[in-house]
Image: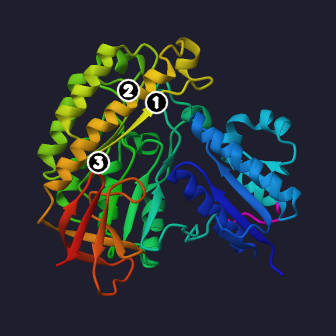
Amino acid sequence: MKKTVNIFTLGCSKNRVDSEVTMKQLSENGYSVVHESAKEKADFVLINTCGFIGDAKEESIETILNFVKAKENGMVKKVLVFGCLSERYKDELMKEIPEVDAWFGKFELPKMLKYMTASHFPTLMPNRIITTPSHYAFLKISEGCNRGCSFCAIPNITGSHISRTMESLVEEATSLVANGVKELILIAQELSYYGIDLYKKQMLAPLMEQLAQIPGLAWLRIHYTYPARFPMDILPVMAKYPNICKYMDIALQHISHPMLSAMRRNVTKEETFTLIRAFREQVPGINLRTTLMVGHPGETEQDFQELVQFVKDIRFERLGVFTYSHEENTYAWNNYKDEVPDEIKQRRADEIMEIQQHISLELNQLKIGKTFKVLIDRREGEYYIGRTEFDSPEVDNEVLITTSKRLAIGTFKEVMVTEADEYDLYAKLV
């Protein structure tokens, strides 16, 4: 009988890619591998943890404890933990949860494989088993971050920015498309920096241009860009290729001068407005997604009201808000006091999201009566669920389609929007 492995992934899509690579390696070694199976019984449970902020750390610890209990009940033989949380807190966790059989850091895949008496095959292609629906996949183009924002623990976990070669990325993307992937989503801790370490200049635009020319790739989407020293040459590339989604995910965090300075963002309010104007002028119809942070040390009510006005003025198509989390060994941890009370942080986050709900509703209602190309992701109850090019999976709006016809998952359909609410569109086939 093959030994069974159940891998659970917590946190971001970058972790998901790491889990997919692990699955491929174990499968090549003869293991029977599943991702987040509801069946509790397994020889090994591997937990890929997140250690970014407080809530994510709590979820990781809770998951570990749940599987320790399953081990005690005889459902699991061994529990192994890897990823960001164990990279950051391995020594403390080993003492606190000794029931875990082994702990591995984020970059210790060969060591973990050796523990499982498995070999490491570094040149596999395809190099992973995708866990997303077969028609889309994430493509991680680099690891690490050099930016040094005050609040962020990621550089402490992942280290300095390391780009993958363009050749390796084109090879992997070509392999994924050949295996049925129609949408590729470029991810990294920070896409904008891509290429500087290898090529001595930003190379995101040339990479996007090469990927866009892969036969059969219907959509190319980018996630996680950074505003300071933004690679402006990606905008004409985005405008040129119809299969590059007119979608920009850029984490702006704040707009007031004091906060941008305290956060060590290396960008000004004026530069931010200029950048947004360039996006909308050079890529007509582009949809902007951003994340903001409230409650950073030193944030006054005046800073917050400036952020509120910014959200009202810009009218982002997609927006999320984090409350500040005081993370060990960050610049903010070492230099600031976590002085904004939690209730004020939450009130500010709620106020921003309430404003954004109204904006989202208004923007969505403008789509009523218009037609869109939609990628069908799944069937759910009476609806087929799809997305436009302006929506990334799991985080953005969805299109709920009513039809008596049978629609194939992973195909494109033309639909007309008939109704809209804050976060979803309702449509019928054209």
Q: Nearer the viewer, residue 212 or 303?
A: 303
Q: Earlier in the sequence, mark 2 or mark 1?
A: 1
Rendered location of residue 299, percent (x, y): 39, 16
Q: Nearer the viewer, residue 56 or 214?
A: 56
* Residue sitting at x 52%, y 49%: 12
Q: Which mark is residue 248?
A: 3
**What amino acid does circle 3 point to?**
Met
Rendered location of residue 379, percent (x, y): 41, 75
Q: CA distance from mark 3 to mark 2?
A: 25 Å
Pointer 2 residue: 348
* Residue sitting at x 20%, y 63%: 419
Do residues under tags 2 and 1 come within 8 Å of each other at their CB atoms? yes
- Magenta stretch mostly in which secondary structure? loop
Which element is circle 1 on?
Answer: strand
Inspect the magenta stretch and tell me whether residue 374 lies in it: no
Q: Quadrant of residue 425?
A: bottom left
Q: Which residues are magenta?
A: 116-121
